[in-house]
Amino acid sequence: MDLDLSQEHELLRNTVREFATERVAPVAEELDRESRFPYELVAEMAELGLMGIPIPEEYGGAGSDTLAYAIAIEELTRIDSSVAITVAAHTSLGTMPILLFGNDEQKGEWLPQLASGEKLAAFGLTEADAGSDAGATRTRAEQRDGQWIVNGSKIFITNAGTDISACVTITALTAEDEVSNLIVPNGTDGYTISPPMHKLGWHASDTRELSFKDVAVPEGNLLGERGRGFVQFLEILDGGRISVAAMGVGLAQGAYDLAYAYAQERKQFGKPISSFQAVQFKLADMATEIEAGRALVYRAAWLKDQGRPFALAAAQAKLYTGELSNRVVNASLQMHGGYGFMEESAIARLYRDQKVLEIGEGTNEVQRMVIAKHLGL
Ligand SMILES: Cc1cc2nc3c(=O)[nH]c(=O)nc-3n(C[C@H](O)[C@H](O)[C@H](O)COP(=O)(O)OP(=O)(O)OC[C@H]3O[C@@H](n4cnc5c(N)ncnc54)[C@H](O)[C@@H]3O)c2cc1C
């Protein structure tokens, strides 16, 4: 058993850490305050090869593994969740369905522009009445004159409405009880995208409602096998959970870093608050739990990279790090006192950004349902 990261993984961690510290940290508060999508940072990340880390080089990706991808997402989230989710949703949810289920023509058309980060892709599963029960899709696609005619809507969709969004892959009913996936290019007539939704956190990330009114897409935009759309998307979510779990570790690490620094700088009763054992114990608990969470995430990524079953490990990592990040960010803000409650403090942003890690890509309850199923219950 070897728990050391390879030189390549260490190098990637250092590169992303430097980028996050030097390029993201100085603008994160402003992007959040102005709810401004980070176009410049996405372009820089594209240059660094971060927009297609696990996508093969033949399609313009970095050709790296899931562990590398998880490390990158962890390092980005340590500084800013909006930037991290932009990369994670684009990679795991936007690009992966086309890589895993696309035919040669679809891969050739879409992957080079997506893996290079020139364009973004979105994943449209959730609907107003189909959230945790994602199979309850109502959006329909009817085959007519060599085309699919799509009618319906999606909600809470990440990366669908930016200036560089290329397409969304969706689930749609192609017959009674038959769900299939379709690629809907941005700009198709009848496909309308709402203004950005107002959120508690992830302010600089793009979240939209999508509406499809007699949207005609070519028959060739069917992604994967007809009728396999729900199963395919569940497989995508299994992989996506590793990146959201990496976000949980990264956010917790970022919150810990802030608490650690503040506890040494802030003096009360004539001493730094870090000299009080109650504060030291909180930091000790945080550091311990973060290591446990990171181990779960790396194990899930490792299993996936070995080609072994990883869905249980991914759900466990996502559940644990979601709740871990909640505990850590809460304890960190507490340690910041009143200053932590002020919007200009970084910990306030991390606090707002944390909650969705327990909701997106399956709520904590859904993770427990997935885990219980794997346990044979
Ligand atoms: C910022 C953001 C970005 C998102 N991005 C995307 C995206 O890009 N693409 C996409 O498709 N979706 C996206 N989502 C949607 C997300 O995946 C859903 O919000 C999530 O799956 C939960 O669905 P819901 O919001 O409808 O909640 P509901 O399913 O209505 O759940 C409400 C509550 O009921 C609980 N619950 C439901 N069923 C059960 C049960 N059987 N047992 C116990 N408890 C249960 C839930 O755990 C939750 O606590 C995003 C959401 C957010 C907030």
Image: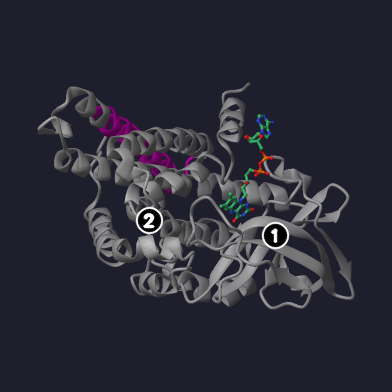
In the rendered image, which quarter is residue 331 located in? top left
Name the one closer to the observer, 77 or 16: 77
Residue assigned mark 1 = 170
**From where the camera sits, is residue 309 visible?**
no
Secondary structure predominantly adopted by residues drawn in magenta: helix
Q: In this rendering, would 2 be left or right of 186?
A: left
User: What's the residue at 74%, 71% (across, down)?
Assistant: 191
Give the extent of the magenta segment.
Answer: 284-309
The mark found on residue 80 in the picture is 2
**Does 61 appear in magenta?**
no
In front: 265, or 181?
265
Image location of residue 342, percent across then percent down? 36, 48
The circle drawn on residue 202 is: none
Q: Which mark is in front, 2 or 1?
A: 2
Q: Position of residue 272 (x, y in %)?
A: 13, 35
Q: Ligand 1 lies in which image quarter?
A: top right
**Side of 36 where 362 appears, left or right:** right
Q: Amino acid at mark 1?
A: Ile
